Image: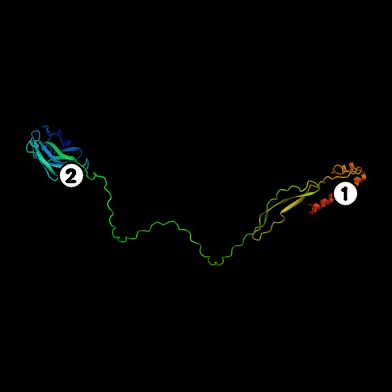
Amino acid sequence: DRYRPGIASSTGSVNYDNSNLEGWRVVRLPLNAWIIYYFPEQVVVSQLLTRGGWGSWSTKFKLEYREKDWGAWHIYPNYLLGNRDAYGLMLNVLAPSVVVKQLRLTIIGQPYQKTPSLRLDVVGCPYLDMGDARGPPGSPGLDGRPGKRGKRGKRGKPGSQGPPGKAGPHGKRGSRGPPGFPGGTATAQDCEWDQWGPWSVCSKSCGGGDFRRERRILKPPKNGGKDCPGVHYAHDVCALTACPFFIDDPLTGKPSEPKSSLLELQKASSPRAASSQFWLLQAVSALLLLCTLLGLHR
């Protein structure tokens, strides 16, 4: 394939088509003038065809190339032969071929006729990187025979500490140790009572009863402290009013309405009967009160 790449030059007007009669020309005759050809993709260049123009030609070139758009220029080991006239076609075969993305031709020294001119054709093919060209994977091969046992390697570094193991069984009880040093004397603490609780309900509603209250020990004695003085409970008498009672009517012999006072008794009976019954009531009330005080009455 012949390529028509874009070009750049160290001088003025440029033309890369050999069918054009003019071509590239150095206007001001600089030494070592050059021209660069840019390719749209990497190509393998195998031949270069040169021809003069403008009635002039160049007789020797230096070939440089880049495999990519950046990086250092590679110099082809041999100079390329130029033309002997303005119209003859010179073929240079590159052996080996080169992979290029950019190609630069530099006129060597002064061997040119009049002003240097050049028309160039590049012959080659697209570059295919065989490292990127891969076929489908093949089937796995057979397992080889086990190799010989290698030599024992060097001892590795200690690994990190593992988690704690399970607790073992309890050991046997050790012998009794020597007695310790005597301790200091403990501070004595006396006993303390808590507050008294509320009084209970009276055990009777009349005729003499009792009620009680209790308390508990708030702090017991320690280290030889004193005991709490007094008792856990206290009691007192209550409902000292005489209870109502029934008295037989001396006229009818039947029980009268219940009487609760001497005044009512005197109104309901004769003076003699009321007097005897009064003293009987006083004796019974005194006996009940005495039993209550002595704790014999329940």
Hey, which quadrant is residue 156 in on the image?
bottom left
Question: Where in the figure is residue 229, as x and y percent of width and height?
Answer: 71, 56
**Could you tell me which residue is drawn at 84 percent across and 51 percent down?**
287
Nearest to N terminus: mark 1 or mark 2 = 2
Question: Which residue is more in the foreground, 105 or 260?
Answer: 260
Q: Which residue is mark 1?
A: 280
Question: Which residue is more in the foreground, 65 or 209?
Answer: 209
Rendered-image quadrant of the N terminus: top left
Disc 1: CA contacts within 10 A as few (<14), some (14-19) or many (>=20): few
Disc 2: CA contacts within 10 A as few (<14), some (14-19) or many (>=20): some
Q: Which residue is mark 2?
A: 74
Indicate the colouring scheme: rainbow
Q: CA distance from mark 1 to mark 2?
A: 153 Å
Query: Can residue 31 be seen by looking at this rendering?
Result: no
Residue type of the residue flagged with mark 1: Leu
Is 87 left or right of 276, judged from the image as shown? Answer: left
Residue type of the residue flagged with mark 2: His
**Could you tell me which residue is drawn at 18 percent across and 44 percent down?**
74
**Could you tell me which residue is drawn at 13 percent across and 40 percent down?**
47
Q: Secondary structure at mark 1?
A: helix
Is 69 left or right of 87, judged from the image as shown? Answer: right
Question: Where in the figure is residue 125, as x and y percent of width and height?
Answer: 17, 40
Hey, which quadrant is residue 27 in on the image?
top left
**Could you tell me which residue is drawn at 84 percent across and 50 percent down?**
286
Q: Secondary structure at mark 2?
A: strand
Hey, which quadrant is residue 57 in on the image?
top left
